[in-house]
């Protein structure tokens, strides 16, 4: 009889433990599923165009608009006019801590003009790269004659990115020449 009581207690405790583990597991899994939704709701989303400015004297903002609104890759498009007689070779668009650089000076052997004199180009920055509440700023430029204008921090960032890209292209060319492949 004492054996039966022990067996019943053991079965009862096992069932209670199994139920408790199941309830805890269900709670943990449902909480994990709901967390991404909470994070998305907490992060502020850019849904309208922020103010757009140019810190470069000869670069004028022509127009701005939102591309792909309502999608994950929505962003701000900015049309910029080069009012100088020099070609723009690199331009930096910044929003708070985020930024995009269009750089035609990456390959020294094949430079690319970003904006011809008195011409326009479209710059694009994904809303995810922008700092919420910060304006979009055309912050720096490099002209064809090597002169530069704009924010010092943006110019330094452009120089570092250009040096990194040049080193990468040089390494790729050396790698191809070692393999005997023709270089472009």
Image (cartoon, rainbow, N blue to C red):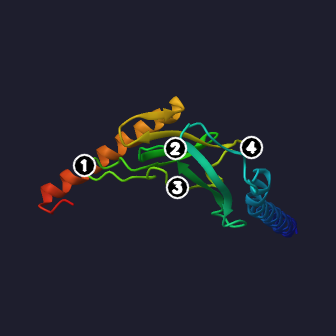
Using the image, tell me which numbered label, if any, was put on residue 171. Answer: 1
Marks 1/3: CA–CA distance: 33 Å
Discs 1, 4 touching: Cβ within 8 Å: no
Comes first in the chain, label 1 or label 4: 4
Query: Which-is-in-front pick, marks 2 and 3?
Result: 3
Q: Secondary structure at mark 1?
A: helix
The Cα–Cα distance between marks 4 and 2, rounded to whole angstroms, is: 19 Å
Q: CA distance from mark 1 to mark 2?
A: 25 Å
Q: Which residue is mark 3?
A: 120
Give the mark, 2 or 3, whose residue is nearer the N terminus.
Answer: 2
Q: Judging from the image, what secondary structure is the residue with disc 4 in?
A: loop
Residue density around tag 1, few if under 14, some if 14–19, many if 20 or more, within 10 Å: few
Mark 1 touching mark 2, by CB under 8 A?
no
- Residue 115 x/y as whole percent: 46, 52
Q: Earlier in the sequence, mark 1 or mark 3?
A: 3
Q: Secondary structure at mark 2?
A: strand
Look at discs 1 and 3 and give the one toward the viewer. Answer: 3
> Which marked residue is nearer to the observer: mark 1 or mark 2?
2
Residue at 66 percent across and 55 percent down: it is: 64
Residue where numbered disc 2 is placed: 92
Q: CA distance from mark 2 to mark 3?
A: 15 Å
Q: Is residue 135 left or right of residue 124?
A: right
In the rendered structure, the answer to whether residue 178 lies left or right of residue 108 reads left
* Residue in the image at 30% along x and 50% along y: 107
Q: At 78% from the left edge and 64% from the top edge, which residue is drawn?
A: 30
């Amino acid at each position: 009889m004492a054996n039966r009581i022990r067996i019943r207690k053991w079965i009862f405790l096992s069932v209670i433990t199994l139920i408790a583990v199941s309830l805890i597991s269900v709670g943990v899994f449902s909480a994990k599923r709901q967390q991404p939704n909470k994070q998305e709701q907490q992060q502020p989303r850019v849904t309208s165009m922020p103010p757009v400015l140019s810190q470069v004297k000869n670069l004028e903002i022509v127009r701005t608009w939102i591309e792909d609104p309502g999608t994950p890759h929505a962003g701000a498009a900015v049309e910029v006019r080069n009012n100088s007689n020099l070609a723009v070779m690199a331009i930096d668009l910044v929003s708070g801590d985020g930024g995009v650089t269009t750089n035609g000076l990456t390959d020294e052997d094949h430079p690319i003009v970003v904006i011809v004199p008195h011409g326009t180009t479209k710059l694009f920055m994904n809303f995810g790269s922008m700092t919420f509440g910060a304006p979009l700023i055309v912050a720096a430029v490099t002209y064809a004659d090597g002169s530069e204008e704009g924010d010092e921090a943006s110019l330094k960032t452009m120089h570092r990115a250009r040096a990194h890209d040049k080193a990468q292209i040089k390494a790729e060319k050396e790698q191809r020449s070692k393999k005997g492949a023709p270089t472009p």
